[in-house]
Amino acid sequence: MSTPGPATGPQAPNADGAELAKFEAGASGFWDPQGEFRPLHLLNPVRAAYIAERVALPGQRALDVGCGGGLLAEALCKAGARVTAIDLAPGMIEVARLHALEGALSIDYRLTDAAALAREAPHSFDLVTCMEMLEHVPDPAAMMGTLAQLLQPQGTLFVSTLNRNLKSFLMAIVGAEYLLKLIPRGTHEYERLIRPAELARWARAAGLTLRGLSGIELNPFTTHVRLSADVGVNYLAFFSR
């Protein structure tokens, strides 16, 4: 049985069925800190702190796009934000809802895509986050435009993704997937990785300004995560209108 490819049509989600299937398959183990999503568990506190240092989260209307099982959504909620979180993987949304219920957290999880929400509720959010998702969609430039449409006029956007160069190929794909087996093989495709200059260009076209760029480094041997000036592999970008 073949896996569906990108959907088509004027109202089709900006999503790739094969990419969604990868994450849907592992949904039941999302909250296992030693499972296949372990790197996300290690990265999440640093990402959440990066956001909290740049935005006063209490009371903020926050949207997490491509929320997965809810790691960042829960962190934002615990910091006082009013969180909506969306994903197109049904299993991930189910796991996220159950985990939030267990933690008595009020998060509005929705099985929908960003473009549909932008049509339904444009310019509705003070803060939008999109972590490790852009490199998995068919048209990341269009997705940046959609994320901008979701922001209110003074809103802020945080994106994390992977750079496209020899270093990232060796570390994020060869090293992390094949040698150290930190994440499943095939998680990333080199051609889909995104250079910071490309991301900044798409943001400008969407009316956004790049405010900051930081590398985020995970030491696979010590599991220590830190921000750095080196954006050669994994990086965080901060935008505003």
Image (tube, rainbow, N blue to C red):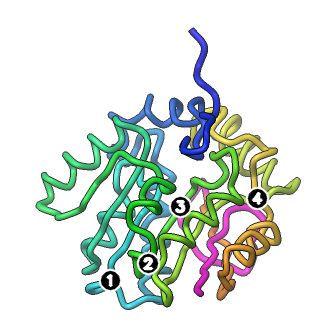
SS at mark 1? loop
Residue tagged by mark 1? 60
Query: Label 2 to label 1, Cα distance in Å?
Result: 7 Å
Mark 2 or mark 1, earlier in chain: 1
Callout in the foreground (2, 4): 2
Q: How far across and how far down the image is residue 211, in percent?
A: 65, 88
Query: Label 2 to label 4, Cα distance in Å?
Result: 22 Å
Q: Which residues are magenta?
A: 220-241
Left or right: residue 195 compared with residue 106: right
Mark 1 or mark 3, earlier in chain: 1
Is the Cβ of the residue at disc 2 closer than 8 Å to that at disc 1? yes
Mark 4 or mark 3, earlier in chain: 3
Q: Residue at x 49, y 71 (%)?
A: 47
Is the Cβ of the residue at disc 2 closer than 8 Å to that at disc 3? no
Q: How far across and how far down the image is residue 24, in percent?
A: 44, 33
**Residue at the farthest right position:** 166
Residue tagged by mark 2? 127
Seen in the picture, residue 203 relative to 16 is either above or below; the reply is below
